[in-house]
Amino acid sequence: MGAVMGSKNLKAVAVRGSGRYTDFANDTASLSELGRSLVKQVKEHPMSRDLQDKGTPGLVGGLNAGGMLPTHNFRAGVFDQVDELKWESYEKNFLTARRSCYACAVRCKREVAFDYKKTPSAYGGPEYESVAAFGSNCCIGDLEAVVKANELCNIYTLDTITTGMTIAFAMECFEHGLIGLEDTGGIELRFGNAEAMLQIIEKIARREGIGNILAKGSRSASKAIGGGSASFTIEVKGQEFAMHDPRGKASVGLGFAISEIGEDHLVSYHDTMFTNPDSISFKGARPLGIVDALPARDLSDKKAVNYFIGENWSSFEKSSGFCYFGPAPRSFIQIEDVQKIINAATGWDFSVTDLLKIGERATNLARIFNLREGFTPQDDRLPERMFMPSEAGALAGLGIDHLEFDRAMHELYKLKDWNLETGVPSRERLSELGIEWVLELL
């Protein structure tokens, strides 16, 4: 959205209203009661407590142990300097406060300061994605440089995932001699060089020298650099990977490939949440119809079903404005509570099935938009590196099996009722969703 606004020189959309939310809510008493109950749940639920304590940076250690911490531009899943990036280092050396979005009781945002906590940053602390993108994936174990990179991106309004991944791509190009000092303006753009990373962020923001090439992202940059550099791009539909390795989480790979916006780590739910039938996440997902606990790397028909249900629920959450860290199966607001909130706010009498249909309707609208703009099923793919074995960590020697992945994607198309050759949703499914009219757009 930010990129689209920027391309139109649109700075902001301002809206002013004179009414209060309660003027429009259907059942304010129920909403108030639910609100008080959920605030209490935040304090009691282990997932929300963990988010409040560590925020998303707490993911670093566990993903590294599981061989899924992106390292060396996704060539490996374990980082030898991970202790410098872990939550313990973050908390000890940089954390100054825990903040929240408006009125949220979870408070998962981090605030930081440099120089032994003496110089506060006005731009907030890095989330997990930023820590891994500028840290392990660029082979940089200097957390202060990572915190600074995050600050620079926020100053310049750059996306930290895309920026970090594009720099990792450029580092691999430098490593293979496809770009040199004459291209970088004398910057030794090598993996592990923290100062070089910070210098390149400045160049990208100002579109200076090689920064002008990298500013459009790795896919565009690879076309300018050539020499086989396209094999170093880790992206889908032009959007760089977030810091999650599909070689360890199979349905995350399905989501990366099929998402309408390119790689999106929030398009569905991560496989590790549904491996243990006794886990909080799995139990929270049961009301959605997820009934099979499966290994994280499984790519069976049952995994496609789990993904399909999760994608529809996640899509509904986005459509309704819920935070991804709020409802089950990810967190503390149970499925039935979400249903109660929606019905109390609107006066509807929607079932969970109805809510899932809202999500499916949204993904089909997005699909039609993409088809109209020229996308095809051939764009629903992963970069070749994901099918190559990870070089280090718990997943060393393991990659995604091409045939298994293709078969799972075909099964997912069938669940969605999308044509395998054209990617077009069936008229019957669109009619069931109440949006048959969108076929006219094609």
Image (spheres, grey):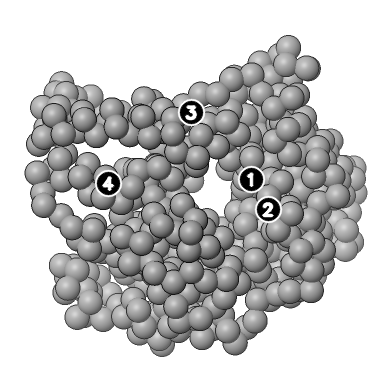
Alpha carbon separation for disc pair 2 and 3: 22 Å
Contact between marks 1 and 2 (CB within 8 A): the answer is yes
Dot 2 amino acid type: Leu
Total marks shown come to 4
Which residue: 23% across, 58% down?
352
Tag on residue 86? none
Instruction: Give x and y (percent) for residue 283.
Output: 41, 57
Residue 74 seen in the figure: yes
- Closer to the camera in the image, 215 or 168: 168
Dot 4 amino acid type: Val
Asked where in the image residue 337 lies, by quadrant, the reply is: top left
Tag on residue 107? 3
Q: Is residue 317 left or right of residue 165?
A: left
Provide the residue designation for mark 2: 63
Provide the residue designation for mark 4: 338
**For the view shown, which residue lies furthest in the top direction?**
118
